[in-house]
Amino acid sequence: MSYKNKIVASTLTLLIGFTAQGQIQSGKASFYPKRMTGQRTANGERLHHDSLTCAHRTYPFGTLLKVTNPDNGKSVIVKVTDRGPYIRGRIIDLSVRAAREIGIIAQGIAPVIVERYNSFEIPFKPVDIIELPELELGANDGPLERPIWQVLRDQMQKKRQEEEAEKKAKEQEKLRLKQESIRLKHEAARLRQEALEQEHEAQHQQSHTTHHSADESFEEINKQPNRSKAYLKRNNSHHK
């Protein structure tokens, strides 16, 4: 091997593009909904669903991160432009393009491995050999699946509606029972009033019958001849 070839081989050996192993995170990743395209991120840039960007809680803006899906081994390099996610268990929010690159669109939320990515250039490394992550924009090549946060939101809304409907049904049942109780009280009061009226009528009839019987008894007694000794003695004295 010539001296020139040895220099080239040595140069190529010193070309290093690697991922720094200082910090490796494992957790769950989600992605921005496509409708958020155009909104400003925490660093002032505008979000685009086809950009290879992400949100992270601690890495400085502009930091390149390598995100790997352990289920299929696919990786993507993204740039930190936003802060978040602030949901327990999640460590990164990806753009739609980045999520598609590692195949988590259908899942919405998936486990990933996140590590800082650095591409070092040795001073005598040829410039044309430097490999940089591709950050160019591309066309959306398929319909976006519903992200998991929308599914969870819809489930929460449905559960809240069911709870409100159940609460309303209980209140209506409680009102119905109250009205039924009032109706039964009124019915009981009416029956008591009727019983009192019937009792009063019976007492009146009994009193009238007793009084009538007494009158008949007095008439019967008056019809009978007076046989008392005083009456007979007085009657005999008049006849003499």
Image (tube, rainbow, N blue to C red):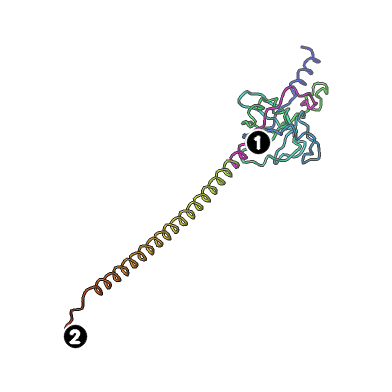
For residue 231, the mark is none
Using the rendered view, name the quadrant where residue 211 is placed: bottom left
- Quadrant in the picture for residue 138: top right
Q: Position of residue 169 (x, y in %)?
A: 54, 45
Which residue lies at the image location 21% right of the left edge and 76% below the top edge?
225
Q: Nearer the viewer, residue 172 or 64?
A: 172
Q: Residue furthest right?
A: 127
Image position of 126 with respect to 235: above or below: above
Q: Quadrant of the C terminus?
A: bottom left
Residue 108, image x and y in percent?
Answer: 65, 31
Q: Position of residue 64 (x, y in %)?
A: 74, 33
Extreme-front residue of the structure: 240
Q: Amino acid at mark 1?
A: Trp
Residue interval drawn in magenta: 132-160
* Residue closest to the eye, 87 or 165: 165
Q: Tell which of 10 and 90 is nearer to you.
A: 90
Answer left or right for 104 relative to 192. right
Taking the spot 70% from the left edge, 38% from the top edge, the residue there is 56
In whole angstroms, how far apart are the C-alphas of marks 1 and 2? 131 Å
- Magenta stretch: includes residue 133: yes
Q: Callout 1: few (<14), some (14-19), or many (20+) C-alpha neighbours within 10 Å?
A: some
* Circle nearer the N terminus (1, 2): 1
* Residue placed furthest toward the top: 1
Of helix, strand and loop, which one carries label 2? helix
**Mark 2: few/some/many CA within 10 Å (<14, 14-19, 20+):** few
Residue 50: within the magenta? no
Q: Which mark is residue 239?
A: 2
Instruction: Judge depth for marks 1 and 2 and give the one in front.
Output: 2
Q: Considering only vertical position in the picture, is 225 above or below 190?
A: below
Amino acid type, residue under disc 2 in the picture: His
Residue 6 in the image: x percent, y percent? 77, 16
Q: Which residue is mark 1?
A: 149
